[in-house]
Image (spheres, grey):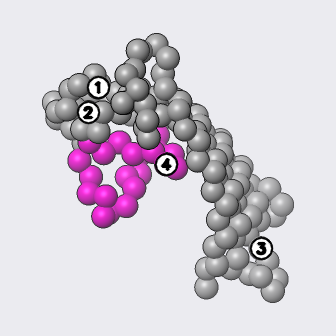
Amino acid sequence: MLNYLGISDNGRFLFPREWGREKFFVSMQRERFEGIGGDLATSVLFDQNFVQDKLSITLGASHVHTPDLENVLLNKYGLPSYYHFTELMDYKFGGFFKGLNLQVLIAAKNEDFTQKIPKKYVINRVNMTNYKLILDYRF
């Protein structure tokens, strides 16, 4: 699935974090568009179920072009343009363990090297990978 998101530069998109994560078609795990205006994002997502729908795999890649880092009105958190890659594997157990899910999530954000980005805008924003092993029981 190929998706595109454009946020106008007439203001920035605000979404209270208490409401959770915004659900745009380009949204992937560990990605938020809150506080950004004048944003262009494209993504490619692949979602497939295997083993009688017990195993699902979701792969995603996106490029997010953000406004100038110093433009606080359109780039509230000073987020540089980046590439985002995610992989989510979700296995739903059956039988005695029905309701138990095992998830593996890998999310990576890498800076867009077409820009010269000062280090203060790189740390805790881009050039990082997040690994999660999640054991979830739903009853």
> Which residue position holds label 3?
93
**Foreground residue among 78 and 85:** 78
Of label 1 and label 2, which has the lower sequence position? 1
Residue 18: x percent and y percent? Answer: 30, 64
Of label 3 and label 2, which has the lower sequence position? 2
- The stretch of residues the image draws in magenta is 14-36
> Which residue position holds label 4?
30
Residue 108: x percent and y percent? Answer: 58, 39
Of label 1 and label 4, which has the lower sequence position? 4
Disc 4 is placed on an element classified as loop
Question: From the viewer's perspective, is residue 15 above or below residue 62?
Answer: below
Q: Residue drawn at (76%, 60%), measured in percent from left and top?
A: 55
Amino acid, disc 2: Asn
State which quarter of the image contains the N terminus.
top right
Q: Between tags 3 and 4, which lies in front?
A: 4
Q: Quadrant of residue 20?
A: bottom left
> Which residue position holds label 1?
69
Q: Would you say the residues marked 1 and 3 are in contact, meaning their CB atoms lie under 8 Å apart?
A: no
Q: CA distance from mark 1 to mark 2?
A: 6 Å
User: Within the magenta stretch, is there residue 33?
Assistant: yes
> Which residue position holds label 2?
75
Q: Between tags 1 and 4, which lies in front?
A: 1
Q: Residue drawn at (80%, 56%), measured in percent from left and top?
A: 50
